[in-house]
Amino acid sequence: MKQPVDDTAAIRLLLDIEAVKQLKHSYCRHVDAGDWDALERLWTEDARCDYGFFGCYEGRSGIMDGFFRTLVGPATSFNAHMVHNPIVEIEGDTARGSWYMTAQTVIQPHNQAVWAMGVYEDVFRRVDGEWRIASLQVGFRYYTPYEEGWAKTPMWQIPA
């Protein structure tokens, strides 16, 4: 016998999943646009980030000032990263999301085009009725010069 479906709970779950997806897409859009003020509003105050070989950052201001405003902003002249294949799980006011990420970036001052691919593992928390990023971790699968590609040089160190 089929279990009855609680329509209200199912709709709430779908709305929460969509809100988390929209939050992640907003993250990508603001990073790519270099809109640090808009990006800053997406994090919880106590957020934590692990950007792999780019470092780990604690707290909203540490993430924004230590990573985005100090490193990403000056080091890139173009970013276009996309997230795909989301898996979002909601449990009350906490959500977990996993996404494949691909990105095309131009690194300065070398004007070097770069391909990147990895997996985001994120935790989101509902704060005052709004979903926010509480934890972000990216595991890079490749980060390579455009001309060489991931088959030849899967991991690449940015020249000094």
Image (cartoon, grey):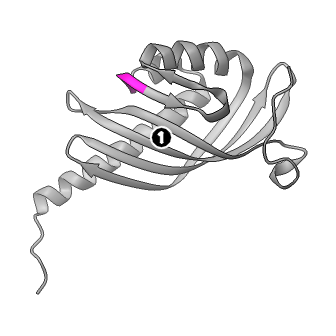
Task: Give the quadrant of the N terminus.
Answer: bottom left
* Highlighted range, magenta: 42-47
Give the answer, above or below, for where 21 lies relative to 37.
below
Viewer-nearest residue: 115 or 122: 122
Q: Is residue 44 left or right of residue 115?
A: left
Q: Is residue 21 left or right of residue 94?
A: right
Viewer-nearest residue: 23 or 51: 51
> Dot 1: within a 10 Å radius of its alpha carbon, few (fewer than 14), some, or many (20 or more) residues?
some
Give the answer, above or below, for where 113 lies relative to 72.
below
Total numbered labels: 1
Residue sitting at x 37%, y 53%: 88
Taking the view exactly as shown, the residue that stands out farthest to the bottom is 1
**Residue 11's image quarter?**
bottom left
Give the answer, above or below, for where 131 lies relative to 151.
above
Q: Is residue 93 left or right of residue 3?
A: right
Task: Give the quadrant of the C terminus.
Answer: top right
Residue sitting at x 47%, y 24%: 39
**Magenta-colored segment: predominant secondary structure:** strand
Residue 69 image position (x, y, % from top left): 59, 14
Give the answer, above or below, for where 134 lies relative to 109.
below
**Where is mark 1, residue-wise?**
25
Residue sitting at x 77%, y 30%: 106
Helix, strand or loop for disc 1: helix
Viewer-nearest residue: 148 or 139: 139
**Residue 19 magenta-highlighted:** no
Q: Is residue 33 left or right of residue 27?
A: right
Residue sitting at x 36%, y 43%: 20
Residue 114 image position (x, y, % from top left): 79, 38
Residue 27 image position (x, y, % from top left): 49, 33
Residue type at mark 1: give it. Answer: His
Residue 118 image position (x, y, % from top left): 63, 47
